[in-house]
Image: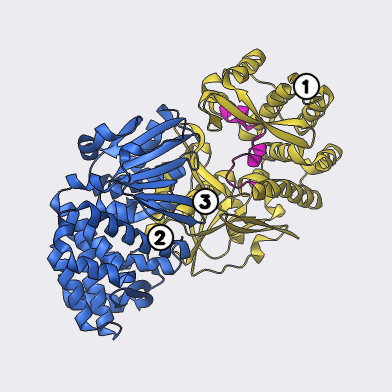
Chain colours: A blue, B yellow
């Protein structure tokens, strides 16, 4: 088992990687678990004793209406500040549970047991949470560290293959922006990774979280440094909305589109773009773009005035933030459609 | 003009008392003002140049639906992190605007120009914001300092007399929990206060804010010290819901009920309870209770398990937090109905 700590302005978060969900210790007068049907079906028997709230499945339930339903259940269960809310599930469960917990009574204690790769390395880490609004991703939310995140890699074994590939898109992103050694490790161990071998997964999840926590500690509320974590996401959020593909697939395509901007601007070698493309394709992720996404880009929440602040690669394992005019971004995108 | 600063964990807030709204300086690419019909009618001509969003009137619009409407307008206006949201109005406008601003895009810059006594001394100060849920007050919200609060006492001149009395209930509360000199000043200057004489109001607003800011700086997220500010409110929130009276009237009654608990427990002299009652009555506020509020108390958000944490007076100008069993509180309340 490995452990990490995030000491953020909004609180401290203990992260345990490789611990079993059955060994979790609860220090609260009342425990409320938020989960979904699938997670409960596969892992419900291993949950700690708690009142359980099931939310629906899929991105379309990541809304204020779902949060409002949670508030109602919290009220019925007489949840209060001595209680603990635990999200057990993927990124959607964690994002929704975190937003509900940080706003109910202006904030009750909460923690996560993420059950997907995506949630273990990304969604559950860093204190961001929230919901979509009018189809725009994560338009409403808060920044607040959970008390704990428990990453039990055994939970990943029940994931569908597509979900494994999606999660690995974020792992590749994390490695690409900040850890060339992890990137090489992934290149050398694609097969074992796709088979979710426990030892390999513990290393990958741990190293990915380290990259994210280092960045989050420098910049919790995303004024600059934290934006690096959005590598691939400026495009991804727009594609997800218009093309209806999964987040991981969208991030994979987004990383390639955004790296072409790096290459075009002389920041990154073409050979490194090819390495990135090669790894994504070995994992089984898409790398080409087919959709008009200009309108969605214009409303993307990372925009400041008519300039997009966007993270790009200087090369594998090294990234920075640049200002790109929306028109220039649109031109690159339209060129590729 | 007087100025103060709150240096909270969630940000720094500059407070200006006695500055004119017309002298306000805006440092943002886009300014969005949230206000209501009445405030716009009386003071709209003095607003800085901005896109204006009017919300409805009264406690019943302090809901997630109203916040959702604001998100929609923010999206239409292409509000982003370089923009500033300014709430100009009473406590409801400030609470709703603050919650929308702290959650849209996980937080955009915001500030307040409170236009009622209640909002100047209480609602706009301290970083708490939020909305009601299923009739329970402030059940959903966040804690985040606004960038600034500008208290222009000239704006108070258009307030209806009832609103003046309501606001003074919070001033009396502030003095009672932490400033015996302000309490005496109020006793000596009730008439000039009710006439809203500018010099008197500047002093009262300033001194009240000082009491609140001192407490907020010690305890921003309400683990203990900040609870003192809820003197009168355990009962008030319950009465407001069930008896349909105004917040100020409810706080006035709440202070008396809660002080009777102090007197009964030997923490406060009966003569001081009489002083408190005397001042409230001179202001024209009610001091007796007629409603069954046990159910509402049980669901009050200050509750931890079956114990209510409640601030009570040790005497005029001095307060502390006690743990009271819900049954004991209900017994005192039922005794008074």
Please state which of the two labelled residues, at mark 2 or mark 3, is closer to the viewer. 2
Residue beneath disc 2: A213
The answer to whether B288 appears left or right of B129 in the picture is right
Residue A161: mark in rendering: none
Circle 3 Cα neighbour tier, 10 Å, few/some/many (<14 / 14–19 / ≥20): many
- Of the numbered discs 1 and 3, the one sitting upstream in the chain is 3
Depth check: give the residue in front, B251 or B198: B251
How far separated are the C-alphas under marks 2 and 1?
52 Å
Q: Chain of mark 2?
A: A
Q: Chain of mark 3?
A: B
Residue beneath disc 1: B266
What residue lies at 60% left-to-right and 46% top-to-bottom? B90
Q: Is residue B78 above or below residue A60?
A: below
Observer able to see residue B263: yes
- Circle 3: element type: helix
Magenta segment boundaries in residue numbering: B219-240
Percent coordinates x, y for residue A54 in the rendering: 28, 35
Q: Is residue B248 magenta?
A: no
Residue B98: mark in rendering: 3
């Amino acid at each position: 088992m490995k452990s990490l700590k995030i000491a953020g302005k909004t609180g401290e978060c203990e992260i345990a990687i490789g611990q079993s969900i059955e060994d979790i210790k609860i220090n609260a007068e009342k425990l409320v678990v938020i989960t979904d049907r699938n997670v409960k079906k596969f892992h419900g028997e291993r949950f700690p004793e708690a009142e359980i709230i099931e939310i629906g499945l899929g991105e379309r339930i990541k809304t204020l209406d779902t949060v409002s339903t949670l508030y109602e259940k919290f009220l019925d269960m007489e949840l209060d500040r001595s209680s603990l809310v635990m999200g057990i599930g993927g990124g959607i469960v964690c994002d929704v549970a975190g937003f509900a917990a940080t706003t109910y009574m202006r904030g009750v204690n909460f923690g996560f047991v993420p059950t997907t790769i995506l949630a273990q390395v990304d969604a559950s880490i860093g204190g961001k949470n929230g919901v979509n609004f009018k189809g725009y991703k994560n338009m409403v939310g808060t920044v607040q560290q959970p008390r704990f995140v428990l990453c039990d890699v055994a939970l990943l074994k029940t994931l569908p293959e597509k979900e494994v590939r999606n999660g690995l898109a974020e792992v590749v992103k994390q490695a690409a922006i900040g850890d060339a050694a992890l990137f090489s490790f992934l290149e050398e161990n694609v097969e074992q990774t796709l088979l979710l071998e426990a030892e390999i997964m513990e290393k990958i999840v741990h190293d990915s979280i380290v990259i994210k926590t280092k960045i989050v500690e420098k910049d919790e509320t995303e004024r600059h440094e934290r934006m690096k974590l959005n590598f691939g996401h400026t495009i991804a959020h727009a594609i997800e909305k218009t093309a209806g593909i999964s987040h991981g697939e969208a991030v994979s395509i987004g990383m390639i589109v955004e790296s072409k901007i790096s290459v075009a601007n002389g920041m990154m070698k073409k050979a490194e773009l090819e390495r990135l493309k090669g790894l994504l394709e070995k994992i089984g992720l898409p790398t080409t773009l087919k959709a008009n996404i200009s309108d969605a880009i214009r409303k993307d929440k990372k925009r400041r005035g008519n300039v997009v602040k966007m993270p790009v690669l200087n090369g594998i394992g090294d990234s920075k933030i640049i200002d790109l005019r929306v028109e220039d971004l649109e031109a690159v995108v339209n060129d590729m459609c």
